[in-house]
Image: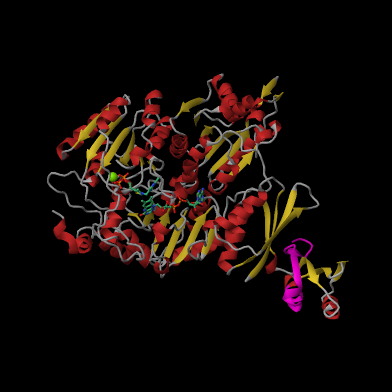
Amino acid sequence: MRHIISVLLENEAGALSRVSGLFSARGFNIESLTVAATNDETLSRMTIVSVGDDGIIEQIVKQLNKLIDVVKVTDLTSMEHIERELLLVKIDVNPDTQADIDRQIDKFSGKIIDVSEDTYLVEVVGQSKKINEFLGSLDALKILEVSRTGVTGVCQKREG
Amino acid sequence: MKLNGAQILVQSLKNEGVDHIFGYPGGAVLHIYDALGAQDDIKHILVRHEQGATHAADGYARASGKPGVVLVTSGPGITNAVTGIATAHMDSIPMVVISGQVPSPLIGNDAFQEVDAVGITRSCVKHNFLIKDINQISLTIKKAFHIASTGRPGPVLIDIPKDITIAQIQEPNYIDTVDMRSYQPVVDAEPKQIIKAVELILSAKQPVIYAGGGCVIGNADQELREFTRQLGFPITQTLMGLGAYPAKGELFIGMLGMHGTYEANMTMHDSDCVIAVGARFDDRITANISKFCPTAKIIHIDIDPSSIGKNVAVNVPLVGEVKSVLKDLIQALKGKKTTDISAWWAQINEWRGVDSLAYQTKEGVIKPQTVIETLYEVTKGEAIVTSDVGQHQMWAAQYYHFNEPRRWINSGGLGTMGFGLPAAMGAKLAKPDRDVACVTGEGSIQMMLQELSTMLQYNTPVKIINLNNGYLGMVRQWQEFFYEKRYAMSYMEALPDFVKLAESYGHIGVKVEREEDLKPALIEAFKQKDRTVFLDIITDPNENVFPMIPSGAGHNEMLLAGRDEMASTNDEGLDQV
Ligand SMILES: Cc1cc2nc3c(=O)[nH]c(=O)nc-3n(C[C@H](O)[C@H](O)[C@H](O)COP(=O)(O)OP(=O)(O)OC[C@H]3O[C@@H](n4cnc5c(N)ncnc54)[C@H](O)[C@@H]3O)c2cc1C
Ligand SMILES: Cc1ncc(C[n+]2csc(CCOP(=O)(O)OP(=O)(O)O)c2C)c(N)n1
Ligand SMILES: [Mg+2]
């Protein structure tokens, strides 16, 4: 099953490589990984999406907790949470396809953020599933470039 | 007063109570050496190879319980140390390694003797640091010792660029303790889990205690003894646990696992309640995991949550220090009555009757098992025994009956040939009043021979028991059993004359070829209190380690000496003239 794991860790040089090294050394799978500073400048937040059975996810959480720089690990999947990802996609557009593409962008609440003679740059925000669906709704041959941020997420309760 | 970084570093080490550093100098650490040379609280042991430094510090740590300390230079200095760091990591040994680094402005430039020490060691340390600011030196040392020696211990590396050892600041205020929000090892297990464990223990009909290295590492031997005696349960120990519970104890049924006793493995197999105490269900223990303890409920005490449920599903997890968890269990079990397990003991005693460690002596050859038994006799079981890796290691574990913890020092998790000799030196420095023997093989000893020179320089008398079977015996055994006796590259031609070799290093060398010379030679060697003696003992080249769980088999499918030896060699028996 797919899990979103949120990791709060000391904002130290090398913290990212400790986490990515852990995943490769132990053969854990990473679907996406994002990391950035938080409101507390001594801490970073990393959000990892991984797929595995319960035993593997339990090991991932335990191994992450074991890293000395890690302050807190939360498996968001086990609680009410919000998940978001941002997509930037460059699409080939011509007068024949434009109407259809516009419709899809509308349907997925996307935003056209740049337009050239024959391309759109579109932004879509949402769950990964929605982004996958949006990309799936486009003609694959017309997708010129895709850049996704990977998932970030928070739990909905006040204390997570 | 202004001090340079190197002086602050050395003072910080003193504050940690460091009395020995094992190291080797080089450009990046010359300021540190300068500071070390200017004091005499810390004794520096100049090894002959950085791997030797790490194993010696490791042996020192295992014998004393204190973290071992290593100092190496950048580049080749730290890469040479990696094997020893990984060895300590696998066996959860507290160690602090300080490596020099090229000056900060040159980092990343492929500077002379630059390697990414933090990157190279990341996966084989508990934690590592690159010091970027002279003001961080004392705090980093404090953190390193704290991390290395608490929780599940392990090696910590501190990489320090040369310029930081040279810069000067006002001498800092050294702190006494450190509290890290991201590192808070658990001590006590959850009370509700203790209650669950007690229920399970009281209802067990076929229980067994399976104790491991955590009992040694966590200094919980007294609690383990009390707990075991309170229950009257059979106890088996891993290779790393030996000595925590005394081998001569009635309730001890021997080591378990690949080369464990028949009774230990059968007991595990048929048990309905396994109490794992500071052990990590290593694959050498479980053998074929799908056949492991098919009927048992499992209670697992471990300080490291990730050890629990990693290889084997556990019914009652008890996360905490063995010492404290056992104390809680002992308390909770006081006055409670366990199930009558006399039928279980009758069964175990029947298995004991198989006498799986019996071996056949042969006229004219020295059996390696006899050597270890004689070593036990001559040292009255009171020596510290280190070992290398191979058959000799298993024989030492099986036939030297360890009755106290920290007497048996070996590389279990990584299985590092070359470990034994430097570890013996480190152990002797930690326990100068105790006899130290290094049980080794002609293969392993050649991996760290150069440390004989260090041992002369610092007068660390050790007795080297070289079980010279002329083969990489453990490899040869596998080839005999599983590769139809195709002995590819497991024979070493051109062995040195070990007697002359020992002599050329300034030690005593003795060759033992006849069984009648064995005991006198050992007695004489241990009489030489101030000398290192190298006993080159020519042993049966064809002896195998039994009993054995072959790969893929379960605990109840062991190969036994005599019976299965014949079966496995039957087809080509005629070749063995
Ligand atoms: C040639 C060869 C053959 C081998 N054959 C065998 C064999 O037949 N049988 C065998 O047993 N081994 C054998 N080994 C060794 C094996 O590879 C493992 O090293 C060993 O089984 C691990 O022992 P352990 O489970 O006690 O764990 P250790 O490696 O000692 O780990 C200790 C465990 O205790 C925990 N711990 C540490 N400190 C504490 C504390 N204070 N409180 C609570 N928990 C703590 C740790 O988290 C860890 O999980 C062999 C090795 C070699 C090289
Ligand atoms: C550094 C290293 N390389 C290779 C091995 C694989 N290995 C395990 S046991 C062994 C043979 C050891 O031979 P020896 O020291 O003579 O001991 P014996 O088995 O003959 O008692 C080898 C090569 C190892 N454990 N360590
Ligand atoms: Mg050999």
Name the residue: 55% across, 44% down: B121
Snapshot colouring? secondary structure
Magenta stretch: includes residue A143: yes
Q: In the figure, B408 relative to B569: above or below? A: above
Q: In the figure, B488 relative to A32: above or below? A: above
Q: How many marks?
A: 0
B151 or B195: which is nearer to us? B151
Where does the magenta region start and end?
A132-160
A157 or A149: which is nearer to us? A149
B260 or B497: which is nearer to us? B497
Name the residue: 45% across, 59% down: B275
Q: In the figure, B409 relative to B276: above or below? A: above
Task: Choose top left, top right, bottom left or bottom right for residue A148.
Answer: bottom right
Name the residue: 37% across, 63% down: B268
- What quarter of the picture does the N terminus of chain B occupy? top right
The location of residue B508, given as percent across then percent down, is 27, 27
The location of residue B503, given as percent across then percent down, is 28, 26
B245 or B166: which is nearer to us? B166
- Residue B298 makes an appearance in the image: yes
The location of residue B468, given as percent across then percent down, is 25, 41
Left-right relation of B217 to B537: right
- Residue B337 makes an appearance in the image: no
Magenta stretch: includes residue B508: no
Left-right relation of B383 to A122: left
Left-right relation of A17 to B323: right
The location of residue B359, given as percent across then percent down, is 20, 52
